[in-house]
Amino acid sequence: MEKRTKNSKTSSPGKQIYRQLAQNAQFQSLVQAIPDIVYFKDPGRRNLIINKAFEKAFRLEAAKVIGKTDEEFLPKDLADSCRASDEAVLRSGKAFRFQEKAASQDGSFTVFETIKAPITDVNGKITGIVGVSRDITEQKTVEEGLRAALQEKDVLLKEIHHRVKNNMQVISSLLNLQARYIKDPEVLEIFKESQRRIRSMALIHEKLYKSRSLSQIEFAGYLRSLASNLFSSLQISPRQVELKTDLEELTFDIQTAIPCGLIVNELVSNSLKHAFPGARHGEIHLGLRRFAENEYLIRVKDNGVGLPAHLDLRETETLGMQLVNLLVDQIEGRIEVERKTGTEFRVYFKEPKYKPRI
């Protein structure tokens, strides 16, 4: 029987393959040309092949790495992380992608993005591990800087929305104080209408301040609050006029939400003030839905006395309807009116693709 040598136990077919690869000039040229860290390990987690990028990253010569496990030359935190990922690959036989962090002596950190995969023979037996690591420290620093900048921007935008809302409430309060000295009913109503318009815009900024998004507003919830505020402001009892809503849960950019909110403010106010004279009872239907890709419909319908048949919405002299026409043009929409049973306004529009704000 042939006598076994001292190193015969390490001369497995797998290690012979790695030895042959290490001696193959073309293979070595390919591995050494890769700018990322590349290494091959045996099932015992000993490093068998490394490239120049490995030596440069850890300031170690190949002679001090080959044949050793990571625990013998890497900092403990990184070595522990490497061992855990190596064992996961060997145990599962699957490739993994992850990030690992290494501390330097000066207290700084290097972050690596690593891919490790098992190497198998023709029978599917795992004969080692191949790993590729890329230094992404600079990328992570930039990402963290951008994240911090975005968080700061979010805080500032929230504060802006909060202050705009507060300023509008101050303006509304000043109008209310001034209204106490107005004796002319028509002038007084103009003041109150201005207050309601300001409140409708302030409500949007309040919703945005409380929302997770600083540019997109949940419009259905906003319309419910707006309608409730109008009933309260005009002192209309829900027992006299019932509000029925059919609102799809949609979100709009603030540049669409403000004009749409003002349109609804005018149309619902108009119904509450004129559709039910003499404490007449009735209903107002408020609807919102998407009827095609990026095409929307707002409906305000009442079963009140209706509009005069001769009234032309485009030629009306009332400020409210003039404002509605201007706002519909602003969102590049169109407005239709039906006078069969009461009055129904339908506003069709598309939400433009707004340019990103800087």
Image (spheres, rainbow, N blue to C red):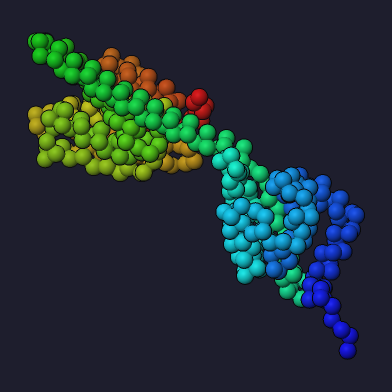
Determine whether 264 is above or below 293 in the image.
above
Give the camera-side residue of 194 and 267: 194
Q: How many tags in the picture?
A: 0
Determine whether 56 is above or below 255 in the image.
below
Give the camera-side residue of 251 and 165: 165
Could you say where residue 315 lies in the image, as x and y percent from the top left? 33, 16
Quadrant of residue 285 within the rendered picture? top left
Q: Is residue 326 left or right of residue 88?
A: left
Could you say where residue 14 lies in the image, as x and y percent from the top left? 80, 70
Q: Is residue 42 left or right of residue 343?
A: right
Give the camera-side residue of 179 and 16: 16
Q: Is residue 318 left or right of residue 157?
A: left
Could you say where residue 103 lies in the image, as x and y percent from the top left? 58, 46
> Which residue corresponds to the image point at 68% horizontal and 50% vertical from the top-left?
133
Q: Is residue 193 visible?
A: no
Quadrant of residue 266 within the rendered picture? top left
Could you say where residue 130 lies in the image, as x and y percent from the top left? 72, 60
Pick out the residue farthest to the bottom: 1
Q: Quadrant of the N terminus?
A: bottom right
Pick out the residue farthest to the front: 6
> Which residue corresponds to the image point at 25% horizontal and 33% vertical from the top-left?
226
> Which residue corresponds to the image point at 82% horizontal and 49% vertical from the top-left?
32
Determine whether 167 is above or below 227 in the image.
above
> Which residue corresponds to the image point at 26% horizontal and 38% vertical from the top-left?
224
Q: Is residue 141 left or right of residue 319?
A: right
Q: Is residue 126 visible?
A: yes
